[in-house]
Image (tube, rainbow, N blue to C red):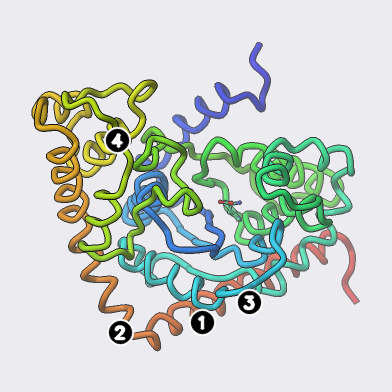
Amino acid sequence: MPNENSYEVALQKSNAIREGLAKTPEKFTMLTGDRPTGRLHLGHYFGTLKGRVELQNMGAKTNVLIADYQVITDRDTTEHIQDNVYNMVMDYLACGIDPDKTMIYAHSAVPAANQLMLPFLSLVSEAELARNPTVKAEMEASGHELTGLLLTYPVHQACDILFCKGNVVPVGRDQLPHIELTRTIARRFNNRYGKVFPEVEALLSETPLLPGLDGRKMSKSYGNAINISMTAEETAKRIKKSQTDSERMITFDPENRPGVSGLLSTAAICTGRSEVEIAEEIGMGGSGQLKKYVTEAVNEYFAPIRERRQRYENDLDYVKDVLHEGNRRASEIAEQTLAEVRDAMGMVY
Ligand code: TRP
């Protein structure tokens, strides 16, 4: 019997949710979010942003969170945070997130959602928090000590999801422990005080993880990512600088030729063709021709998105309005949920 919290079960449930969404999208409330630590890149776009826009346009209730408090889980500064937050809104809007349909808000602007943290913390044990594998991995990767916030941010993430009664959360595999914890918290709350919160399920991405240009995990710190916000010229430059190998014949072989294969995967996802097909077409053209092909594929795909983004860059007042309106709506919803929580707990005076 597979464990309720195994990846296989999560995948099955995710597929069931996908079917449900196609039939009755209005029954679903999606919430997902990003940490505003820098610009969003192609990995974000193909891994999650594109899917969010699809859910939004299908008619699910959609909410997108800019997780500013999570920035300080494993770093000691909020440098550039305002700029990162505004730019994140621009990325969202450029990619097709429509603020009339999707609520965009920031953690720190919704006090009532943050207040859920107190009752929720009482529902989990220190041991449960300490064995979260994603928290451990983040601590190791950042080299940061385990702060109280790093240890407990998965509980805060439960606040994110549950304040708006989210029941579907598009995430990558690394986030599954947090979804599991959210489900545990909702159940325990409902059992102890009466039903307030829904059952939450993860929606796993259907597209395989897009590697960086060098074949490694796509990451800002590796310099192997193309940002949505880059110009066509910046994109060309970044691709030109990426590491390939000395073999002229282009083949798709992620294990032995990570650079060439990372480039092929990037071209494949932008053109809808397969890596092998593109490799065969370029053949003896070598990495020069491959890079030219990738550059054109990326720039062509992102041209309309970047054109829209440019308009938002020139209209910061509009970007701020979108965020303020999202924050206002989120606060309204959070106040409502918090009132239900106080009521269930008998804290009504
Ligand atoms: N932890 C997520 C990440 O690192 C971001 C996030 C914050 C999130 N709150 C969330 C994702 C709620 C889904 C639901 O990418």
Q: Secondary structure at mark 2?
A: loop
Q: Is residue 32 above or below residue 129?
A: below
Q: Which mark is residue 245?
A: none
Q: x, y percentage for residue 193?
A: 84, 52
At label 4, counting other C-alpha atoms closer than 10 Å, the crowd grade (few under 14, some 14-19, many 20 or more) is many
Q: Name the residue beneath numbered marker 1.
A: 324
Q: Nearer the viewer, mark 3 or mark 4?
A: 4
Q: Is residue 324 above or below residue 45?
A: below
At label 1, counting other C-alpha atoms closer than 10 Å, the crowd grade (few under 14, some 14-19, many 20 or more) is some
Q: Amino acid at mark 4?
A: Thr
Q: Secondary structure at mark 4?
A: loop
Q: Amino acid at mark 1?
A: His
Q: Out of 92 and 333, give the one closest to the viewer.
A: 92
Q: Name the residue beneath numbered marker 2.
A: 314
Residue 265 placement, left or right of 16: left
Q: Which mark is residue 244?
A: 4
Residue 294 placement, left or right of 259: left
Q: Name the residue beneath numbered marker 3.
A: 109
Q: Out of 308 and 125, give the one closest to the viewer.
A: 308
Q: x, y percentage for residue 90?
A: 38, 71
Q: Earlier in the sequence, mark 2 or mark 3?
A: 3
Q: Earlier in the sequence, mark 1 or mark 2?
A: 2
Alpha carbon separation for disc pair 1 and 2:
18 Å
Q: Nearer the viewer, mark 1 or mark 2?
A: 2
